[in-house]
Amino acid sequence: GAVVSQHPSRVICKSGTSVKIECRSLDFQATTMFWYRQFPKQSLMLMATSNEGSKATYEQGVEKDKFLINHASLTLSTLTVTSAHPEDSSFYICSAGRYANREKLFFGSGTQLSVL
Amino acid sequence: AQTVTQSQPEMSVQEAETVTLSCTYDTSESDYYLFWYKQPPSRQMILVIRQEAYKQQNATENRFSVNFQKAAKSFSLKISDSQLGDAAMYFCAYRSGIQGAQKLVFGQGTRLTINP
């Protein structure tokens, strides 16, 4: 089956620093990738939709200047948490689909971000 | 906007028994997809089963089956012959059938415990 690789799996950083998370589709081209955030014991909340070659679409309430998304190629999307603060500590998961609409989505293994 | 509701925060079942997890959703669309995802302690999202709204027949995957009631907007998951490995968070999810709309809307999740 299709594989989505997400790195790093865990990152600890100091408050005020920036952290980049990568999401790669290893064996297929993904024109669209999705970034979710999951707080402990809660559901996945969509943060933004990453479109290859164009600007990301952010969900209401998500700060685009805080969470920078770049989808420069058909196999890579990155999420950068800028000037991270303790409240940004969370589990971030990406997902990607091979075709529009009909194909199922594949998930990365997630990144646990801890901001000290 | 579409919403997904899982009214059972926690469920438990004896090993080898059958358990049903509930899910309801709200949408004005006629074409959509419904999913059940499993999230074990590793937090990797695993697709359990998928149902296309235009199909009347309930989807089945080995020990997992759904009861899809379109008019009632209900989509429950039945797990037969429960196994210890089934213990996880289970999320019900909705995806629009509109061309290009791939994002998933998740329910709150149900934590399933299997008692040996």
Image (spheres, grey):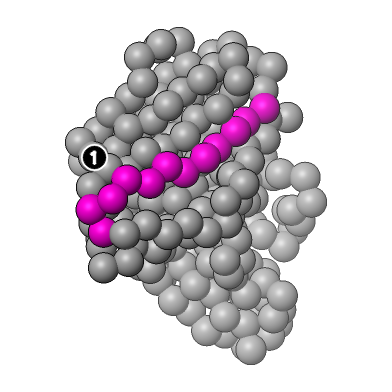
Q: Is residue A53 left or right of residue A104?
A: right
Residue A79, percent from left and from top: 55, 58
Secondary structure beneath dot 1 equals: loop
The residue carrying mark 1 is B63
Please tell me which residue is depicted at 42% across the width and 19% down the height of the picture.
Answer: B52
Q: Please say whether residue B79 is visible from this viewpoint.
A: yes
> What type is the residue that disc 1 sits on?
Arg
Q: Residue furthest right?
A: A61
Residue A60, percent from left and from top: 77, 45
In the rendered structure, which segment of residues is drawn in magenta?
B15-26
Rendered view: B77 above or below A103: below
Q: Is residue B86 left or right of residue A70?
A: left
* Nearer-the-camera pick, B88 or B72: B72
Does the magenta-highlighted stretch encompass residue B16?
yes
Q: Residues within 10 Å of mark 1 (few under 14, many from 20)?
A: few
Q: Which part of the image, by quadrant, shows the C terminus of chain A?
A: bottom right
Residue B112, percent from left and from top: 42, 58
Q: Is residue A50 left or right of residue B84?
A: right
Please tell me which residue is depicted at 27% across the width and 42% down the height of the picture.
Answer: B80
Q: Quadrant of residue A5?
A: bottom left
Rendered view: B87 above or below A46: below
* Nearer-the-camera pick, A16 or A3: A3
